[in-house]
Amino acid sequence: MVDVNFGRLNPTGLLDLSRVVELSEWSLEGDVLRLGAGITFARLLEPGLAAMVPALAQAARTVGSPQIRQRATLGGNLATGSPAGDSIPPLVAHLAEIELASVRGRRRMPLGEFILGPKRTALRSDELILSVSMRYSVGAQTFMKVGARSAMVISVASIAMLVDDERDQVRVGYGSAGPTVGLVCSSRAAAAGLPGAVENACVPIDDVRASARYRRRALRVMTERALERCVG
Amino acid sequence: MRIEATVNGTPTSIDADPCLSLLTVLRDDLGLAGSKNACEQGECGSCSVLLDGDLVCACLVAVGQADGRTVLTIEGLGDGDGGLHRVQQAFIDAGAVQCGFCTPGLILATVSLLDTIPDPTEDEIREGLSGNLCRCTGYQKILDAVALAAAVAAG
């Protein structure tokens, strides 16, 4: 709509996916939570969903403003494929899978393979994002984001940390510090090494929002704080 | 495309390009200029309206999406006889209006906030209004007005 408002886009028609009720549903199969691509960030803040995926809910709360969260959807955030997309670090830390559909059928892939580069994804021109799925019965998790103010900001750097007791893993998804959202994992015993590992793995750039040096430092500090929250 | 929507309580039929923003059609076709046109990219909140009761930026809604739905703008908020809504009255009483450009959006954001949280804390007020900018920077009195509206409702 922004491109329409600024005269950069003059569509001959639009499809209103918000009326496709099935896209806005979520379901549980065993310990796998399937979130429809049409679920808005406002709905992710509802207590039932937020309790199952707290890091994703914390990320949802930092998206835009109340007005934006009423309209903005998970599927939209993923299709945009920005390295700063707020929902992506928690979903990557969850090892989430994305489900795509076209007249040729459905296909699934890890979210990490779906996002190819800054705002580039594996979505074909005739495909629709149906859902993302993840195991939700994991341990402690958190999300943190640095920005110029609390609302209406594109993140300068963000992380989501998740403790997966079943696999004995602590996973960190980090955003705005490379061409795509990154993932760093360790065993629980070696989790103290995560701040350094994230600092080394990230490949941030200098831009109008922050310097690469600041972003690298912010990721280290956020990972240290997340460890205090999630691992103790 | 013919769009049938209930605008401020009145069934309204609009013949418009469905890809235009709801804001454009409200202002240019329906003459409802209370929703302000400023950033046109969802940053400022001055075009905030309630769409089926949800607070949205009218500039980010394609008007075709309003078909079959209800839209409430600042013009429809009072009692219809010139009487003000309690949130409008609270903004006057608290002196929360300076140039007035952001006021319609802020009032609708406040109505939406108080619908969800009737007695918000200051942090909840700040978060609820975080999508609305006031370039006169009169935020303190705006916060006071929201607290006043909540207190009036609580009696």
Image (cartoon, grey):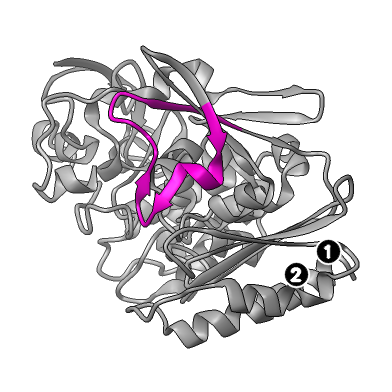
Residue A119 vs A197, above or below: the answer is above
Residue A222 in the image: state x and y as whole percent. 67, 75
Determine crowd level at label 2: few under 14, some 14-19, many 20+ residues with C-alpha closer than 10 A.
many
The residue singled out by tag 2 in the image is A226
Q: Are marks 2 and 1 in contact (CB under 8 Å)?
A: yes
The residue singled out by tag 1 in the image is A230
Q: In the depicted view, which residue is nearer to us: B57 or A98?
A: A98
Specify whether residue A221 is painted magenta: no
Determine crowd level at label 1: few under 14, some 14-19, many 20+ residues with C-alpha closer than 10 A.
some
Residue A213 vs B123, above or below: the answer is below
Q: In the depicted view, which residue is nearer to us: A88 or B48?
A: A88
Q: Which residues are magenta?
A: A108-132
Quadrant housing residue A109: top right
Q: Residue at x 32, y 43 (%)?
A: B74
Query: Tag 1, which chain?
Result: A
Q: Residue at x 29, y 42 (%)?
A: B60
Residue A128 vs A85, above or below: the answer is above
Q: What amino acid type is highlighted by mark number 1?
A: Cys
Query: Tag 2, which chain?
Result: A
Image quadrant holding the N terminus of chain B, namely top left
Question: Disc 2 on helix, strand or loop?
Answer: helix
Residue B55 in the image: state x and y as whole percent. 44, 41
Q: Residue at x 46, y 58 (%)?
A: A180
Judged left or right of residue B82, residue A145 is right
